[in-house]
Every structure is written in structure tokens, then in C-alpha cells.
Amino acid sequence: MIAPPITELTDRARDVFRLAVESYIETGQPVGSRTLSKLPGLNLSPASIRNVMQDLEEFGLLAAPHTSAGRMPTETGLRLFVDGMMQAAEPSAEERAAIESHVKGRGLIEDALAAATSVLSGLSACAGLVLVPKHEPVLRQFGFVPLSAQQALAVLVGQDGSVENRVVDLPPGMTAGALNEAANYMSATLSGLTLAQARVKLEREISDGRAAIDAAARELVSRGLAIWSEDGASRPVLIVRGQANLIDQSAAEDLDRVRQLLDELEGKEEISRLLENARTGAATRIFIGSENKLFSLSGSSVIAAPYRGQDGRVVGVVGVIGPTRLNYARVVPMVDFTAQTLSRLIG
């Protein structure tokens, strides 16, 4: 039977259903009519509650596992609860402060994104996910800080305000003046270009004899661009943190499900494709269980929200993955706040 809209349920059915779902989310266990009858706000006998739960089961909103006399929400029931009944709670001041302190003050965008996944994982007791922007940074300014006679710290500043540092080996005989010359040349000539465009322009200027720097400086510029380009090509598209959170007490009863979920997380391409679906949404998206075929076996849920770059366009997605019984009312606003924090940082 197709589940009815929440408005078609009686007040009694809505109350019983809401309490059954909230109890399941809190404990991870099926709930019985006697347990519900003892909860405040529900003045019904166990027999009356049992009849309502039977109706909810016929609607496809609750199910009775064969090992238990209690009932638990189906994925259809969870979707109805999330879309029509859930009262989302704003992140607490402590949670907001934790998210902001972990994300801000990071030099590399990737470091901020990795920190976002870690703090989300810790606060939600799920695994944190973030889809990293795929575009190359647009260059704004360069600098070289001498570390020794053989090495220097190359500093790249992007148009989005990101700062990246790399240690580069210096050509023999490189002087402090040549370091400044190379940095000034890069800032004046290559600003406004991506790394790929900068390498092409540099090669063209060298071949045409128009690179107004000496041989040592040219070699240093080439080395710096090559290191940044190679690092960019190897950056992870998907960052996952906190997989251990997925192995909770209830996991011991269903190790096959947890093993399946961990295998799914290893297949980052599949997870990335799922998160890509959240890029098109204006707000946080919730994927529950087999609504996505990727999680049809593990019975997991994903909460994901897009974050935006300097021009307001979506550049990535941040979220969490956990069991279908996760606390949606608490985690959804938490993911949304993290996405907003990343957007402010990048923008």
C-alpha cells in the first residue's frame, strides 16, 4: 500500500507514529505499545496503541522485525517523518563554535574541508564527507622565502584568498635578488591565470625569448608551477573522516550491514556521484536507505548540503553518512551550518 500523506493520518496516528520514530532514533531498537503508553503526552492504553501501530504497519510506515514484538519505522516512514513531522533544532552555540573554530584559520582550502569533515563526524557520531572543488585556483600573487642555500618556501595566493605553501629546491647559485625577480615576474605575468594556463604561457614566453628573467629564475618558476600542478592533480575529490563512528553498539548485531557500508565508502566514485546530486539543490538534501541504490544493502542515510565559492556558484558538497536511525532533527541543521561556514570562508 502507498503511504498516505501525513495530513491524512488522524491526530492519534500522528502522535503514535512520531513517538515510535523518535524512540527508534534514540535507542535503535523496535518499540512496543507498552513502552509508548508510558511516555508523556500519549494518554492511550497499550491495546489502543497496538491497534494504531497495526494500522501504521498496513500503511507501510512501521514494520515488525521477526525477532521482536515491537515495531520500527520503515524507510518510507522515515521519509514521511523527515519531510512532514521533524522539528529541526538549530545547532547549539557550542556546536557552532566548534565548527567555526575547526574550519577557520586554515591556509589551504583542502585543510579547511578536511577539518569540516572531522568536526562534523565528531559532533554527529557519523562519518563526515566533503566533495572537494574540482576547479584549479586562479592565481593572484607569488612569493619565495629562502630557507637555506638549497631550498625556499614557495607561496601561492589564489584569487579566492587561498594560500598554498610548497618547499622547492633552488637551482645552483640562486641569490635572494633572483628569488625576488622570479616572484615579481610570476605575479606580474601569470596573475589571473590557472596553473595550467600559467605553464602554457611561461613555456611560450621562454620559447619566444620574451621571458625577462635569467635562466636560474626561469628554472625556479618552472619548478614551482610544476609542483603546484602535480599536487593539484593528486588532490582527493572526496574526503571521508570518522568511519569508526559507524561501528556502534547496534552494529554488532548486523556486522554484514556495517561491512557493506564500509565497502561502499571505499568506492569513493559512487559516493561522489551521490553527493553530486546534492549540488543542484538549494538546501540540504537527505538520502534515506534504498532511495539510493548505493545503500540498498547497508541501509544507510546521507545528509548533504552544497557550499559556494566567491561567485556564489556551488563548488562542492559537505555532509555525513550514518545509519538510517540517525538524529535527523539535530544533524540536518548541523550540516547546513557547516556548508554556510565553508561558503563564507571560500567566498
Image (cartoon, rainbow, N blue to C red):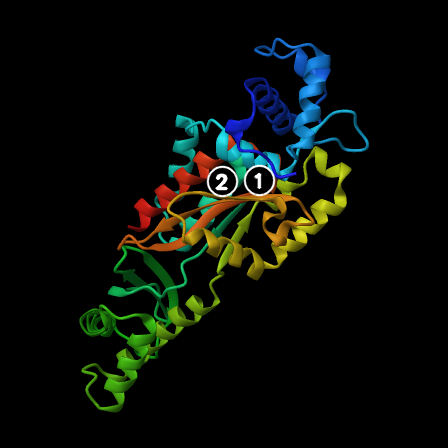
Contact? badges 2 and 1 (CB < 8 Å): yes
Closer to the chain start, of discs 2 and 1, is 2
Give the residue at x 45% y 51%: 278
Disc marking residue 340: none
Q: Is residue 175 left or right of residue 248?
A: left
**Which element carries disc 2, helix, strand or loop?**
helix
Give the residue at x 61% y 24%: 17
Give the vertical position of 203 relative to 263 (above or below): below
Residue type, label 2: Leu
- The answer to whether residue 316 is seen in the rendering is yes
Q: Residues within 10 Å of mark 1 (few under 14, many from 20)?
A: many
- The answer to whether residue 221 is seen in the rendering is no
Q: Which quarter shows the N terminus?
A: top right
Give the residue at x 30% y 81%: 200
Q: Is residue 227 left or right of residue 240?
A: left
- The number of numbered discs placed on residues in the rendered structure image is 2
Give the vertical position of 137 relative to 248 (above or below): below
In the rendered image, residue 210, in percent from the top left (x then y), is placed at 19, 86
In the rendered image, residue 148, in percent from the top left (x then y), is placed at 35, 66
Q: Nearer the viewer, residue 226 or 82?
A: 82
Residue that label 2 marks:
120
Residue at the bottom extreme? 208
Residue that label 1 marks:
126
In the rendered image, residue 32, in percent from the top left (x then y), is placed at 72, 20
Dividing the picture into quadrants, the one containing residue 170 is: bottom left
In the rendered image, residue 166, in percent from the top left (x then y), is placed at 38, 64
Residue type, label 1: Cys
Q: Nearer the viewer, residue 33 or 164?
A: 33
Q: Is residue 257 left or right of residue 175?
A: right
